[in-house]
Image (tube, grey):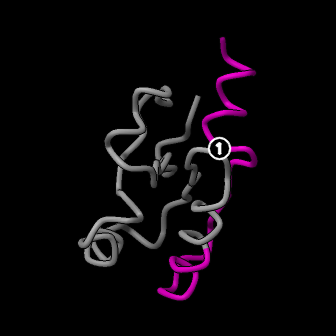
Amino acid sequence: MVKEDTVVLDVRTPQEEVEGVIPNSQLINLMGNSFSEEIDKLDKDKTYLVFCRSGGRSVTACKFMASKGFTRLYNLLGGIQAWNTRHI
């Protein structure tokens, strides 16, 4: 169960959702034109659990968010692929 001050952040493209979703996650496409603006709308006081397909883009997203002042960032190693192997 995710705590109230924690956001599960999916940085994949909308088309990648066919590979699975983590319940109650929020999608902000790292490759989308509005990624920076969407990140700016997020609460910096919350904890973010960030994931993508395999873990690469979520590292990039975490680094970008850290540069914007976010301090409580966690990358899901292996992305949704790793999640799916543990939750099938």
Q: Where 22 sits versus 36, above or below?
A: above
Nearer-the-camera pick, 25 or 43: 25
Label 1: element kind:
helix
Q: Where 68 sits versus 31, above or below?
A: below
Q: Residue furthest front?
A: 15
- Asked whether residue 86 is drawn in magenta, I would say yes
Nearer-the-camera pick, 46 or 32: 32
Q: Quadrant of the N terminus?
A: top right
Q: Which residues are magenta?
A: 63-88
Q: Where 38 sits versus 51, above or below?
A: below
- Asked whether residue 8 is drawn in magenta, I would say no
Q: Amino acid at mark 1?
A: Gly
Relative horizontal placement of residue 76, taking residue 41 as reference (left or right): right
Q: Quadrant of the C terminus?
A: top right
Residue at which label 1 appears: 79
Q: Where 14 sits versus 85, above or below?
A: below
The residue drawn where x is 35% and y is 56% is: 28
The residue drawn where x is 55% and y is 40% is: 3
Relative image position of residue 69 (x, y in whole percent): 51, 85
Relative horizontal placement of residue 23, taking residue 52 as reference (left or right): left
Quadrant in the rendering for residue 71: bottom right
Nearer-the-camera pick, 12 or 73: 12
Quadrant in the rendering for residue 2: top right
Q: Residues within 10 Å of mark 1 (few under 14, many from 20)?
A: many
The residue drawn where x is 41% and y is 64% is: 30
Relative image position of residue 8 (x, y in whole percent): 50, 46
Relative image position of residue 79 (x, y in whole percent): 65, 43
Relative horizontal placement of residue 28, taking residue 9 as reference (left or right): left
